[in-house]
Image (tube, helix red, strand yellow):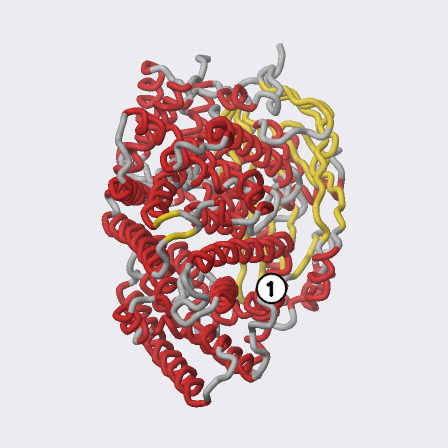
Amino acid sequence: MSSIIEIRNVTKEFKVLNRREGLKGSIKDLFSRDYKTVTAVNNISMSIEQGEIVGYLGPNGAGKSTTIKMMTGVLEPTSGEILVDGNVPYKNRSKNAQNIGVVFGQRSQLWWALPLIESFRLLKDVYQIGDKQYDSIIELYKSLVDIEPLLHKPVRQMSLGQRTLSDILAAFLHDPKIVFLDEPTIGLDVSMKAKIRTLINALNKEKNTTVILTTHDMGDVDALCRRIVIIDKGKMLYDNDIEHLKSFFGSYRTLKIRVDGDLKKQSEVIQKEVPDFAVSADDEWISVLVDEDKKKVVDVLSQLQSSYSIKDMKLEEISSEDVIRKIYEEGVE
Amino acid sequence: MKRKGLRFYLRIYFKILAQDIKSKMSYRADFIISTLGMIFTNIAGFVSFWILFRSFPSIKGWSYYEMLFLYGFSLISLTPVQCLFDNNWSLRIYVYSGDFIKYCFRPINLFFYYQSEVFDIKGLGQFAFGIGTLIYSWNKIGLACTPLMVLKIVVFLITASLIMIALQNAAAATCFWIQNSFYILDLVFRFKDYAKYPVTIFSPVFKFVFTFLMPIAFIAYYPSLVILRPDNVPVLTWLSPVIGCIFFYISYKIWMYGALKYNGTGS
Amino acid sequence: MKLKKYLTLTRAGIIESLQFRLSMLVMVAGNLLYLIVIYFLWKAIYASADSDVVNGMTFSDTLIYLVLATALFNFMEMYTVWQVGRDIQSGKIVLDLVKPMDYRRYIFWSFSGAFVTNFFCTFLPTFIVVAIVTNGAIHMGLNLLYFAVSVVLAIMVNFSIDFIVATICLYTESIWGINMMKQVIVLLLSGATVPLAFFPDTLRNVVDHLPFQAIYNAPLTLLLDGDPDMKDVCITLGTQLAWCVGMFIVSKLFWKHSIKQITVNGG
């Protein structure tokens, strides 16, 4: 069976301007400029099957959106080969566009001034969706989410959550084989996040649509993805099941505490107290990365509480940045 | 997948247009103020024209009413660029903020998709002003009104519009290469004000510049010769419909090339 | 030190505008082209006139007047209305309002950097070119000093008017319409498009009692007068100063009042 997306040894390089600093530098820049080459994506290969939901993770500037732009046909790879449903996206952008849907978390692609239903009708024409297919997908949407109140509201008057929801629905409207979701839950509250995750899952099941998801939120990954691809500085670090990854981060949580005195100094003292875990400090918090396989967070907390007066504390699940950093530092095996 | 021909695009365009006008009408205050702004602009244009030529009976053999004819002609030929391609003004902002990428994912022509998003209804006011001026000066000069004359003027108005559109497209597209390209667009926008003067007032060098490099002479002067100086029409005038199409095509290509190139560098 | 924080904004503005190398080139080139158009246009106009002096202005007077008016426009127009209007619509204004600096001052000083670069990159070159082209028609004497003082006052009058118009944006979404009306009115009534000397008497009378003439007409009249009469200079500068103070107070009060209104009503 051939895969829906096939990426082979893809590299993308950019030329960027080196700007000098300060007033003097700006004047110098007027007369001479020097460029440097940046490798945004470095020799990446992967293949993705129809119906998969793939979490595409990495810190900001890792090369995620560059890869997505190449898959959507907006960018041409410097070298290597990409096939999306048998097409070379860059050479056939328009045809490729018929096969894909794209959502950018904070950039709505809908017509700003139009009510949602009118946007849908326009998309029906743009993608040449048949009446029957259109009606059935609208029915499906109605059964999945409460869209009635949204349909007649202009996009500009919607809240961010409603807009994201609308954008996702619009992306699935023409029954594309692949949907790219870039940070779909960014800036949303917990209940909206849950709603959107449920929706994506349902649409994926119903339509067997392949979903490529980039996110910084491990909650998204947990709720949606079976497979994870991690990229950092343009290089692929990891491509495997989520189960495998969970052994990396599942048992880790970050305990954040606030104590009296200089946090930097205090953190060094605390590091000695809990030598097994990494301790760091920023302006507000001292963070302890606790491995719960070794010791429960409550135990660490009570241990610290006995020697320090803790004014405030919070607990954070590990973020994708932390996972990536760990993978980067420790390797995948 | 069905072929996407002219009918497909026209259908989509008119659908967007209808929706757009509907939603604009719902912002009444904005609509009224913008229309007022447009009327003010045109009145001010007339007033300065009137003040200027009040003191002078003619310029290099062009009478007051002939100048007025050129003025009216240029107003009409600037209407399509105002109405249909106004989104070019926002291009630089979309590019700068990175939002431009959102136009790249649809299975339709990128240029079309981008420009179709905005229809500037205010331009119609300018159109009315232009028609009024043209008819008024037409009468004052005492020109005949035959079907052939009307046909000629329509053809050459379209030509002139194409050239202005081409200029604006090319100017707007510069933002794909340089930041803050507002000045270029603004420059072209201001230069179109000089389209209404006969190009004969310039020295040969600039006559060449305004004919071939920055072809504003095609916006009113060359086409008007067909009506105003029918005995002495240069070859260039007859060629101008072709030139208009060529310029438009080139500007379209530049725009598209820029759009794809930009995506290759933007983050 | 209080001035220091303002000068920091100036410096940042200079750095920012220097980043856009090409746009500056375009601005200079654009001004030169514009100069050329005006030169030929008015040469033709004067050639068609009966005498060398029209409405008390010679050809070189008119040329200097109009070209420098445009240069002044480029130098002074900071698109304040756009900027403030956009800040208001995007809600960014809230961030700026909580900065430990009066918003009006913050805007003015952020623009001051661009004033400096624009002065050197557009106004000065244009001035030199005009001086050379008109071959000594610009008298180099005390009038330059008066001109300089007058320009500073003009900048402040212009900024106050801009800010008054920008404040209106708190009440309506129609930035385009508002800005268009402002620009058209200011340019026409300040004598930037046609010298006020060409205006018919009644209109001239009205215009003389409006603040707009203090922006372009006042400094340019001072510059063109090679043999200034102390009394006239004092009257011109005095009127400018009065407008400057008057408009400043109006803009300040209007802004304060409007902001209060908005914050109370939760705009």
Q: Is residue C42 above or below residue B114?
A: below
- At 53% from the left and 63% from the top, the residue drawn is A312
Q: Specify the amino acid type for callout 1.
A: Val
Q: Is residue C120 above or below residue B115?
A: below
Camera sees residue A190: yes
Q: Give the x, y percent position of residue A65.
A: 60, 37
Camera sees residue C73: no
For mark 1, give the secondary structure. Answer: helix
Quadrant assignment, res C183: bottom left
Q: In the image, A222: left or right of C153?
A: right
Q: Is residue A90 above or below residue A191?
A: above
Q: Nearer the viewer, residue A159 or A205?
A: A159
Q: Nearer the viewer, residue A221 or A267?
A: A221
Residue farthest to the top?
A1
Q: Give the x, y percent position of residue B226.
A: 40, 32
Residue farthest to the bottom?
C231
| Chain letter for mark 1 | C
Residue occupied by mark 1: C133
- At 35% from the left and 76% from the top, the residue drawn is C247
- Position of the C terminus of chain B, as image quadrant, is top right
Q: Give the x, y percent position of residue C238.
A: 40, 85
Residue farthest to the front?
C50
